Amino acid sequence: MTLLEIFPSLRSGMASPRLDTTVWPSRTHYDELGRITVDGVALDDVADRYGTPTYVIGETEIHTRCRSYRAHFPDAEILYAAKALLTRTIAGLVVDEGLGIDVCSAGELAIALSAGVDPRRIILHGSGKPFAELEYAVGAGVGRIVIDSLTEVSLLGAIVDRPQQVLLRLTPDIDVHGHPAVRTGVSDQKFGFALHDETTEEAIRTLIDHPLLDLRGFHCHLGSQIHDPDHYGEAVRRLVARMAEVRHDYGVMLTQLDLGGGHAVAYRPGDAELNLSELADIIDDALDAACARNRFPRPVIAMEPGRGIVARAGVTIYRVTAIKHVPGGRTFVIVDGGMNDNPRVALYGARYDAVVAGRHPTGPTVTATVAGRYCEAGDILATDIRLPADLRVGELLAVPCTGAYQHSLASAYNGVGRPPIVALRDGRMRELVRRETAEDLLLRDLG
Ligand code: LLP
């Protein structure tokens, strides 16, 4: 049963969809057969070779995004936030583009180190880092550690046996009005230290007094999907003022200011994204103003974009496994993946688009909801999107802008292993991470 058979009246109202460049990887086109190709490879061919669902990465897009950050912020340090998506190849690729890496666990650190990343280019952060992780990071020679609590000040103070650079994470109390799960810059949440309170003062004093802990500056992370660059300007003003207070109170000059990540990308055509040129201007102006007001030398700015580097590079491909119309209700297109490979819809109410990947549809479209295969009603991938009325079971659907927080958030719920990651470049495909199989699940189950 096709959607057109369900809705015969929709033969009129032809649509000719185009691939919006704001949500697809660079070098995404329709080929002469009408199939979607990314970096010179048809998604259909990826599905034939690796099955579905599969995370596809257009490598060129990652290079382009890294270069764009370097070009917009020539004086800043750009650290890729590994939590968005980390494989050894991707770690190597961003480092080759001149970025550092920001990791938040021993696992991410191990992947980055095994990719040959120079530990001095790695920053470790995270709330509640276990003692063993701090020990591992210090032993590995990680460049900087972002301190998140007084406990960490003591633990780190006890671990270090040579100088260790650290940053102190502050919450500048800036509300970016995002989803509550990802609003991190406001005061009443678990991260970092308040701008001013006794605990913050104690942390600063203890770090400055410690012979081996070398406090270099402050860190903050305001939240996710921030499209208004003014929030970063405000963070610069508040944190530079705080740095000037440290100079006044302790005679110590802090030189680094890490503004975290959170740069918004467009998930669907028309979504607001953060404009990097505007961000660069606003940070620059804020630095000028704040440094002049406080008579403070310009700190070196660091930024930690994750999504901004990899989101648009990713496309997830699925096979349609069933099509259903609920009388008086919605039309569901069910695919062979879902909330395991993309939990962002269920977690944050994220909205995605999906398109047919194996042909260029030009006929009528209908409104449908793309749902997954898992045993939960909330297992939805794309709500109320337009799909070709003649869509059939077995066809390939592609969901763009799935490079960030997909594989890294994925689960093996219902005993379905995580999909592989396949990178495309110049007409070639290479598997970066293989599919997780039932054998993998059994390996962990000791019986
Ligand atoms: N730096 C720090 C300290 C962070 O906590 C994060 C993200 C980043 C950088 C990178 O943020 P990005 O530029 O990628 O937005 N799972 C959520 C996102 C959680 C982000 C947590 N921290 C999602 O799928 O939207």
Image (cartoon, grey):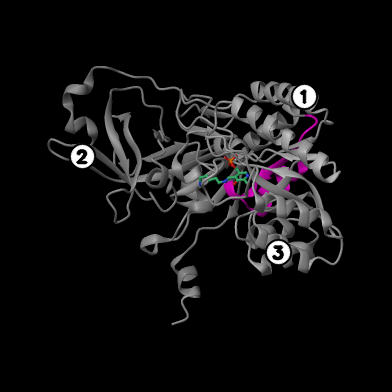
The magenta-colored residue range is 74-98
Residue underneath mark 1:
293
Horizontal side of 92 relative to 182 (left or right) equals: right
Residue 414 rendering spot, x and y as whole percentages? 36, 62
Q: Secondary structure at mark 1?
A: helix
Query: Can residue 117 be seen here?
Result: no
Whole-percent x, y for residue 276 in the image? 65, 25
Residue position for label 3: 134
Measured as percent of width and height from the top left, residue 140 is found at 78, 63
Q: Name the residue carrying label 2.
A: 1
Element under label 3? helix
Q: Cα distance, mark 1 to mark 2?
A: 69 Å
> In the picture provided, is 57 more to the left or to the right than 17?
right
Hey, what amino acid is under mark 3? Leu
Question: Residue type at mark 2?
Answer: Met
Per the rendering, the mark at residue 257 is none
